[in-house]
Amino acid sequence: MRKRDAIVRYTAPERINHWITAFCFMLAAVSGLGFFFPSFSWLTYILGTPQLARIAHPFIGVVMFASFIIMFLRYWRHNLINRGDIYWAKNIRKVIVNDEVDNTGRYNFGQKCVFWAAIVFLFLLLASGVVIWRPWFAPLFPLPVIRIGLMLHSFAAVSLIVVIMVHIYAALWVKGSVTAMAEGWVTQAWARKHHPRWFQEVLKKQEKNVK
Ligand code: HEM
């Protein structure tokens, strides 16, 4: 139930955008692991049959990439690294014991690292994915390039899976974050505790709107 002092953190279009990205990631990651490890081949049934998974996997990847680009355009400004982030990184011990470091903006340094890692690995996945995409693009490239493409694709996929595992762990660890992305709102206490500088900015905006 939405609290009376709730602050909007994500609008409905933002949440739909995020969950489309997350859903595509899950399907692409699970089917991809199925192709990669013979003992995990049963995972490809997540998309119906192994043959269907083989056809759908690259298309799902492209949708995930496009969806993340929309997120990237929405949030890149909030994820620029600043001096406060170095202070946050130096005080990481506080964060580990569930205390907060003052002056965090809309996103903390950890979230910013996830954001930039995600865009780098998604670009790598797309570029290498095109090179190895049979039957459409792979015939355009010589075999050694396809081999490098396969290596890069596997490396970027495993890296992105690790990054998103950290992202999910952090989202579950900070109580109230999942509500923010599921329902769109956070309490003032949550905003003050975890993102004090963002909270002040929201209050200023609200004051301006009242005037
Ligand atoms: C099922 C898995 C996922 C869960 C449970 C999840 C959960 C969340 C939550 C709770 C937030 C809000 C954090 C906050 O506002 O403080 C968030 C934000 C975000 N998520 Fe996810 N997420 C998932 C998958 C993904 C994937 C696959 C991507 C990208 C490939 C992604 C990218 C982002 C980005 C970019 C933000 C905004 C934070 C920022 O810009 O630094 N998420 N996620």
Image: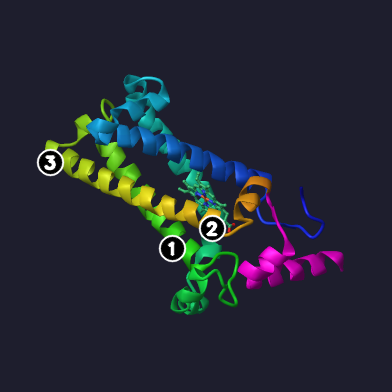
Report the residue at 50% width, 38% height from top: 23
Q: Quick one: 199 or 90, which is closer to the camera?
A: 90
Q: Earlier in the sequence, mark 3 or mark 2?
A: 3
Classify mark 3: residues with Cα within 10 Å, few (<14), some (14-19) or many (20+).
Answer: few
What is the x, y in percent for residue 18?
55, 45
Three-letter amino acid code at the position of disc 1: Cys
What quarter of the picture does the C terminus occupy? bottom right
* Image mark for residue 144: 3
Residue 54 sits in which quadrant?
top left
Q: Name the mark nearer the viewer: 3 or 2.
A: 2
Q: Which structural element holds mark 1?
A: helix
The residue pinned by badge 2 equals 173
Q: Name the mark nearer the viewer: 2 or 1.
A: 2
As drawn, 95 above or below 153? below
- Give how far apart the Cα atoms at labels 3 and 1 are: 32 Å
Q: Which structural element holds mark 3?
A: helix
Farthest residue toward the right?
211
Residue 116 sits in which quadrant?
bottom left
